[in-house]
Image (cartoon, coloured by chain):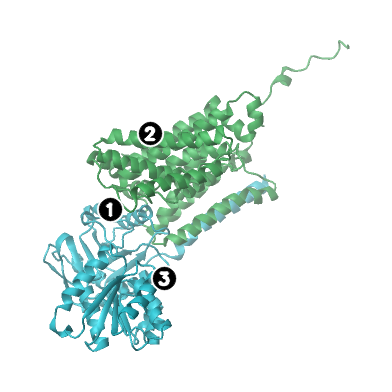
């Protein structure tokens, strides 16, 4: 050995977690694109409609998407690990029916929410069991349970509605949980916040922390990137998958409780078609359907973009079909952008 | 770096344009003094388009009223609530709804009324707590009487008549048949006896066979009343197929688009159902009356413009009038609508 060779610098042993950040990496992040979209939506709507930038109107608008948004958080994690739960809307219906019967039996608001979440938990565990124990593809399982859960609701209820709920329960769904408080300074105030939106925000922070700041979060990304490699690295893949289906069921049950309280009534067609709205939120939020890529911030931004676009368009009395066409076009455009950018050799870092 | 910036600019520009385009295209005029939103079950339905045309006709007649005609993409309560919320946010003066769910729309209806917006329902009702008035197209006694009057006119008041109903358990049809029998007690129908009531269960094939059976069992049968859209179209088909045109006539409640051919063939002289244009017109007239501060307590009278007056009944229920009659002169025109 040649002793004259200088000792290599210690730097050699530093392994970077990620390539160094450059400006374009930051600017082309998926979330930045969504922020631009969100700002554009707000600016355009404010210019076009004098009713848009009104705290009460905006608070009311959140009522209409918060329940779906809560489920979208769980759906984001499922899609991240290459699974999907299409039975969420059917779980909403089954949970809402359970709440309807529980209310007739004299349960209070806490009992009703517990009923909804409990039914959701059972449904989610059923999905998770089929997916993990029997190694069935989740898309097939949940298409099946979608019909099963909705079907049970339809068989039991027929064309009947459940309309008797305690007033305290209805208030939770229909009035602002945090009331408007003015401080005397015109721009400084506590905005009115409905319970469903508040729960969504709290859960979003919680999910964001778990996914991006804990070991479990890293494990989810690992499963999404390569489930087999993740298993060989000692990650309990099936256990985590099972838990995600349970979480998805529980949040669907919670959303069912919030929706029932808001409507003050439930029928077997409650929340019909929601699963696709929720998947839309998640995909627009930048969670890759191929797994392993996504962020909770992106999903939250997508929820706000979709909610405000829909609200803004209906403020201008644009018919629902046109709104659907627009959201469909937006989704395709947003999915196409990375491919187009690929061709010009800049790719957004998702 | 250059590519990045250019791409970003394009991206941002593109997004703003995409986001802005639909809104800019349809910026609404805000000239009218009063804005009335007509929110129906779903769009792309010519029945509701006809209702909206009636509403616009009423707005034109009254002046100073803007009609906002809208609906959600999916005919669900949740989506309809979002649309109503957007109307509340715009602080419209009145909302006319054809409800996707009677109970689920009560909270949003209450919210609108708390904010000083007048809410009424038509076509499909909101439960009483969520609206001021519901305008029904017609009422049981009027629907029953109208059908007896039509067959009497066709037959000149002479000849045996039978009823071809839906299922024997259907409350609507049964109450209409009761109303028919009430009308039948009048002396002018003494030469027009009711000989049978049969049930086709609202199935095309069963109704068709029941109609054939009626003709065989009652050789002197001259007329049939079918208070169901399925019964009347199957019965009319049985008349045409059996070569009975001109010998037996059918009437009842039918849809112009389904009945047009049979009316033109002569199997059906006239039939009835409500007219959607008049329905939208009357609803808007009532709303205008409510907006001008008219009382809506039980027994109050509300104006329906050229359609006359209606009286508010129990639970805010009001009735537009007797069903609208369709015959050779107008069936083709309405067949295009519904």
- Nearer the viewer's eye, disc 2 or disc 3? 3
Q: Residues within 10 Å of mark 1 (few under 14, many from 20)?
A: many
In the image, residue B62 above or below residue A251: below
Mark 2 to mark 3: distance in Å? Answer: 47 Å
Mark 1 or mark 3, which has the lower sequence index?
A: 1
Secondary element at tag 2: helix
Marker disc for residue B170: none
Which residue is label 3 attached to? B205
Q: Nearer the viewer, mark 1 or mark 3?
A: 3
* Point 65% across, 44% down: residue: A347
State which chain is coloured cyan: B
Chain to which the residue tagged by mark 2 belongs: A
Residue B25 image offset from top left, x and y in percent: 46, 65
The residue sitting at 57% across, 31% down in the picture is A220
Residue at mark 1: B103
> Quadrant of the image for the C terminus of chain B?
bottom left
Q: Which chain is green?
A: A
CB atoms at circles 1 and 3 under 8 Å apart? no
The reply to the same-chain question for discs 2 and 3 is: no
Quadrant hosting residue B149: bottom left
* Residue B212 drawn above or below residue A340: below
Q: Are marks 2 and 1 in contact (CB under 8 Å)?
A: no
């Amino acid at each position: 050995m040649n002793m004259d060779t200088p000792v290599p610098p210690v730097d050699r042993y530093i392994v970077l977690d990620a390539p160094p950040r450059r400006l374009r990496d930051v600017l082309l992040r998926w979330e930045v694109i969504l922020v631009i979209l969100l700002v554009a939506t707000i600016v355009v709507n404010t210019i076009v409609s004098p009713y848009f930038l009104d705290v009460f109107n905006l608070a009311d608008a959140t009522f209409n998407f918060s329940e779906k948004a809560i489920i979208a958080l769980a759906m984001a994690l499922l899609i991240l690990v290459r699974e999907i739960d299409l039975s969420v809307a059917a779980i909403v219906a089954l949970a809402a029916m359970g709440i309807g019967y529980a209310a007739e039996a004299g349960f209070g608001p806490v009992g009703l929410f517990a009923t909804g979440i409990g039914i959701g938990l059972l449904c989610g565990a059923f999905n998770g069991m089929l997916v993990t124990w029997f190694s069935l593809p989740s898309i097939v399982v949940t298409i099946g349970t979608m019909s099963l859960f909705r079907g049970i609701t339809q068989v039991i209820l027929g064309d009947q509605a459940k309309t008797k709920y305690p007033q305290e329960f209805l208030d939770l769904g229909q009035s602002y949980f945090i009331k408007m408080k003015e401080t005397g300074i015109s721009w400084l105030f506590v905005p009115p916040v409905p319970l469903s939106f508040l729960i969504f925000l709290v859960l979003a922070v919680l999910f964001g922390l778990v996914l991006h700041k804990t070991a479990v979060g890293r494990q989810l990304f690992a499963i999404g990137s390569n489930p087999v490699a993740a298993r060989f690295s000692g990650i309990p893949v099936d256990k985590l998958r099972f838990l995600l289906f349970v979480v998805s069921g529980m949040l669907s049950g919670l959303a069912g409780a919030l929706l029932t309280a808001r409507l003050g009534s439930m029928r077997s067609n409650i929340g019909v078609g929601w699963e696709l709205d929720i998947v839309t939120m998640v995909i627009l939020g930048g969670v890759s359907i191929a797994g392993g890529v996504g962020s909770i911030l992106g999903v939250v931004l997508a929820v706000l973009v979709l909610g405000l676009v829909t609200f803004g368009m209906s403020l201008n009395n644009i018919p629902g079909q046109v709104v659907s066409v627009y959201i469909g076009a937006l989704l395709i455009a947003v999915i196409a952008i990375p491919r187009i950018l690929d061709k010009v050799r800049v790719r957004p870092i998702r | 770096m250059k590519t990045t910036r250019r791409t970003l600019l394009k991206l941002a520009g593109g997004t703003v344009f995409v986001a802005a385009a639909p809104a800019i295209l349809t910026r609404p005029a805000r000239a009218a003094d009063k804005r009335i939103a007509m929110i129906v079950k779903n769009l792309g339905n010519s029945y509701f388009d006809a209702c909206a045309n009636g509403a616009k006709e009423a707005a034109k007649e009254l002046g100073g009223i803007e009609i906002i005609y809208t609906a959600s993409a999916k005919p669900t309560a949740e989506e309809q609530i979002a649309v109503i919320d957007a109307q509340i946010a715009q602080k419209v003066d009145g909302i006319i709804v054809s409800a996707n769910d009677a109970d689920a729309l009560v909270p949003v209806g209450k919210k609108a009324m708390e904010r000083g917006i007048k809410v009424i329902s038509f076509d499909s009702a909101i439960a009483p707590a969520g609206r001021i008035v519901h305008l029904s197209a017609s009422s049981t006694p009027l629907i029953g009487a109208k059908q007896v009057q039509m067959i009497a006119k066709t037959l000149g008041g002479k000849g045996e008549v039978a009823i071809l109903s839906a299922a024997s358990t259907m409350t609507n049809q049964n109450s209409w048949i009761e109303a028919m029998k009430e009308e039948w007690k009048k002396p002018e129908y003494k030469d027009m006896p009711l000989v049978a009531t049969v049930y086709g269960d609202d199935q095309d094939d069963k109704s068709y066979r029941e109609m054939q059976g009626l003709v065989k069992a009652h050789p002197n049968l001259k007329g049939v009343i079918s208070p169901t859209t399925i019964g009347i179209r199957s019965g009319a088909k049985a008349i045409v197929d059996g070569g009975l045109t001109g010998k037996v006539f059918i009437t009842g409640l039918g849809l112009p688009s389904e009945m047009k051919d049979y009316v033109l063939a002569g199997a059906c002289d006239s039939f009835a159902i409500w007219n959607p244009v008049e329905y939208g017109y009357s609803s808007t007239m009532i709303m205008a009356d409510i907006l001008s501060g008219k009382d809506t307590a039980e027994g109050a009278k509300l104006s329906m413009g050229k359609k006359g007056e209606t009286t508010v009944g129990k639970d805010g229920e009001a009735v537009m009038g007797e069903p609208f009659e369709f015959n050779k002169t107008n069936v083709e025109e309405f067949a295009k609508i519904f």
